[in-house]
Image: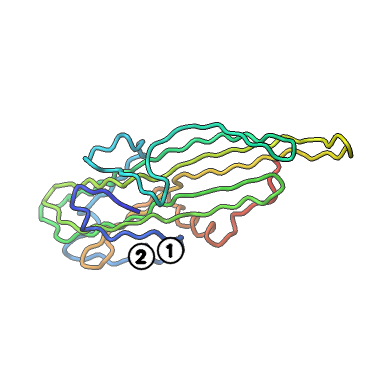
Amino acid sequence: MTISLLTPRSSLKITRRWVNFSLAAAIGLLTPALAHADVSVSVDKGQESSQHKVSGAGAPDSSNGGGGGGKSHGGYGGGGSKSTTDETTGSVFYTVTVRNLANAAAKGVTLEYHIFNKTSNTATGQPTTISVDDLTATSTFDLDPNAKKDIETTDIPKKSTHTVTPGSTDKKSGKVTPGTQSSTSTSVMGWVVYIKHNDKLVHTYMSTDTILEEVAKINKGSSGGGASSF
């Protein structure tokens, strides 16, 4: 994943990996130089990628589908039936804002965040499968007294696909083949932001109080359901 910041891109260490999160990662010690009360963190509700404020931000990432969006309809033949597919694609980005509420400068503040992009797959007669992609990046910077830092993510893909194959009847044998449906949906389910100073965790901000539990449950495979019937 590529992250676009208001600071040079070279300050980033970027990774993409499947989530294997531990709740213990959210526990840390405060440091005298920077305390929880000295900093605040906020994340916006997400915007379409065309709304990037930073010049050059949101460049398409070929590994995740990139930016842009649209809706397409397609069809193909098979076994005497014609399948139709409705597909909507696009991307969003988020702005993370860090504020230094203290009257002293904060040197070497590290922001680390994880955006959890969930993909759900359903198909007639098949169990639902869910996976989570952890899109993460870190950046270290200084904050003047009462100053703030805005960090924009790059484009995060979202997608919705629904395919319908109608049933058919063989004219010779009379055998009936039932119709099927399948759907795939990809969207952001939440995020976690960590603020560190001198390698100590100072602040943890989560989209919801249960986001880590939800991610852990999916990662363990316990969120899969029974066969989909639509």
Q: Are marks 1 and 2 in contact (CB under 8 Å)?
A: yes
**Under tag 2, what secondary structure?**
loop
Categorize mark 2 by other alpha carbons within 10 Å: few (<14), some (14-19), many (20+): few
**From what the image shows, is residue 144 above or below residue 160?**
below
Residue at screen point 45% across, 57% down: 212
- Residue 146, label in figure: none
Residue 7 image point, x, y percent: 18, 51
Vertical order, 17 against 81 (above or below): below
Q: Nearer the viewer, residue 87 or 173?
A: 173
Q: Residue at x 11, y 52 (%)?
A: 144
In the picture, measured across the screen, residue 193 lies left or right of residue 133, that is left
Q: Residues within 10 Å of mark 1 (few under 14, many from 20)?
A: few
Q: Is residue 184 left or right of residue 169?
A: left
Question: In the image, what residue occupies the spot 34% across and 52% down?
Answer: 205
Amino acid type, residue under disc 1 in the picture = Leu
Amino acid type at mark 2: Ile
Q: Nearer the viewer, residue 202 or 222?
A: 222
Residue corresponding to mark 1: 23
Residue linked to disc 2 = 27
Mark-to-mark CA distance, 1 and 2: 8 Å
Q: Write down the quadrant of residue 33 in the picture.
A: bottom left
As drawn, is 114 to the left or to the right of 189? left
Q: Where residue 128 sits: x, y (%)?
A: 63, 50
Q: Position of residue 159 (x, y in %)?
A: 48, 41
Query: Horizontal and vertical percent for residue 229?
Result: 71, 42
Dot 1 lies on which element? helix
Q: Is residue 71 above or below residue 143?
A: above
